[in-house]
Image (tube, rainbow, N blue to C red):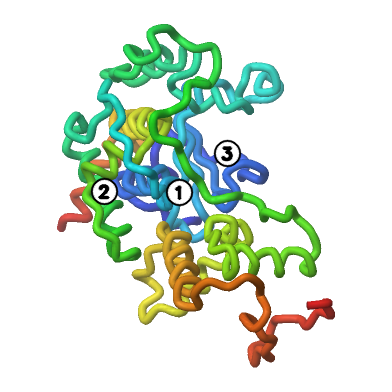
């Protein structure tokens, strides 16, 4: 039996995996046109995912980077739409056990005790 | 947690795709569905949404093995997504204007980047790959090409070298290696060849096997 992380952590891992692909994007700065998908348009939970990953990246590399410019200027459209789709699917999928209890809520409660 | 849930079921382990993430959990009730692929140690996962059935033999013909399978922008994937998970906003449609039958060829404004999956020299003998790794790293300063020779299995070595391996950020292990390689290259400075840059030393650890080679 494998020890599985709580769903919330899985969501974080999902974001981490998606964003890790772009870890070494040292892109020549070119402001993309805004047609949606800006950091400011993300909900708080997604912003937290991005900010958490950027904080880890900053810690490892020592490079100064803020979550907003990372998301807006360094991520390409494909990554943003995939991030959007995967996190949306995870956030709107309820997890219930055999007794129809919501697994996610119980796990979060357990973590915050 | 997924093991306890009714919505996900453990499927056959991944062997070809999702390398390094063999434990395979699939959301039930048909496509589109979430697939969670988990590493053996349970600390990392690769999560994606598949828009085509993964069941055999349909997967051979319905595009499951193509890039469009997991690209929400392709074909009617966005509509499929919205039908399964409520509240999905197709904010990029205004950009493309029409739906796409396959993964968009449109160039992103910002190019994507990923570390190479295979060595630059190809999967050759150690006599070929080691010099090319050193050449890319120490002479060319092409750290990204050098990373093509770094196995994911080496990430565990980084964890072992940290004071507390349990808090090691494995998700950023490739970034850590990238930074270390670049720092070493920058410290050594510019060189036109490997001459004088590397010397052979005996490794007093069990495991490595000496190989005769011309360099």
Q: Residue A51's x, y, as percent?
A: 23, 48
Chain bearing mark 2: A
- Between the C-alphas of marks 2 and 1, the distance is 18 Å
Q: Give the left or right position of residue B104, taking residue A33 as reference.
A: right
Q: Which one is in front, A45 or A21?
A: A21
Label at residue A107:
2
Q: Are marks 2 and 3 in contact (CB under 8 Å)?
A: no
Q: Which residue is mark 3?
A: B11
Do circles 1 and 3 both sit on a common chain? yes
**At 47% across and 60% down in the image, what residue appears?**
B174
Q: Earlier in the sequence, mark 1 or mark 3?
A: 3
Q: Give the left or right position of residue A11, taking residue A113 as reference.
A: right
Residue B171 in the image: above or below residue A78: below
Q: Residue B72's x, y, as percent?
A: 44, 22
- Between the C-alphas of marks 1 and 3, the distance is 15 Å
Say if residue B92 shows up in the picture.
yes
Where, by quadrant of the figure, is residue A55 drawn?
bottom left
Q: Are marks 2 and 1 in contact (CB under 8 Å)?
A: no
Q: Give the left or right position of residue B76, taking residue A106 as reference.
A: right
Label 3 secondary element: loop
Chain bearing mark 3: B
**At 54% across and 24% down in the image, what residue appears?**
B69
Label 1 secondary element: strand
**At 15% across and 58% down in the image, what residue appears?**
A113
Q: Residues within 10 Å of mark 1 (few under 14, many from 20)?
A: many
Label at residue B45:
1
Give the number of the mark in front: 1 or 3: 1
Chain bearing mark 1: B
Do circles 2 and 3 both sit on a common chain? no
Label 2 secondary element: helix
């Amino acid at each position: 039996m494998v020890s599985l992380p709580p769903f919330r952590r899985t969501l974080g891992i999902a974001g981490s995996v998606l964003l890790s692909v772009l870890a070494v994007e040292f892109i020549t700065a070119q402001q993309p046109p805004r047609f949606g998908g800006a950091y400011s348009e993300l909900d708080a939970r997604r912003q937290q995912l991005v900010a958490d990953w950027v904080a880890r990246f900053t810690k490892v590399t020592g490079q100064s980077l803020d979550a907003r410019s990372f998301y807006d200027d360094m991520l390409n459209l494909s990554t943003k739409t995939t991030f959007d789709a995967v996190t949306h699917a995870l956030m709107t999928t309820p997890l219930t056990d055999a007794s129809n209890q919501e697994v996610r809520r119980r796990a979060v409660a357990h973590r915050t005790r | 947690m997924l093991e306890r849930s009714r919505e996900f079921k453990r499927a056959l382990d991944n062997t070809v795709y999702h390398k390094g993430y063999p434990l395979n959990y699939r959301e039930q009730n048909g496509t589109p569905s979430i697939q969670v692929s988990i590493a053996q140690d349970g600390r990392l996962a690769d999560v994606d949404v598949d828009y085509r059935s993964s069941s055999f033999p349909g997967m051979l013909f319905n595009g499951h093995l193509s890039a469009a399978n997991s690209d929400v922008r392709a074909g009617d994937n966005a509509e499929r997504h919205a039908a399964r998970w409520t509240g999905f906003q197709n904010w990029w449609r205004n950009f493309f204007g029409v739906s796409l039958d396959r993964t968009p060829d449109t160039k992103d404004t910002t190019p994507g980047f990923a570390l190479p999956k295979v060595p630059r020299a190809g999967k050759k003998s150690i006599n070929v790959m080691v010099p090319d790794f050193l050449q890319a790293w120490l002479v060319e300063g092409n750290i990204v090409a050098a990373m093509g020779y770094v196995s994911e299995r080496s990430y565990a070595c980084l964890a072992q070298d940290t004071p507390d391996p349990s808090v090691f950020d494995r998700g950023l292990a490739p970034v850590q290696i990238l930074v270390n390689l670049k720092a070493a290259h920058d410290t050594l400075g510019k060189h036109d060849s490997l001459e004088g840059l590397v010397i052979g030393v005996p490794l007093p650890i069990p495991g490595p096997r000496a190989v005769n080679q011309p360099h």
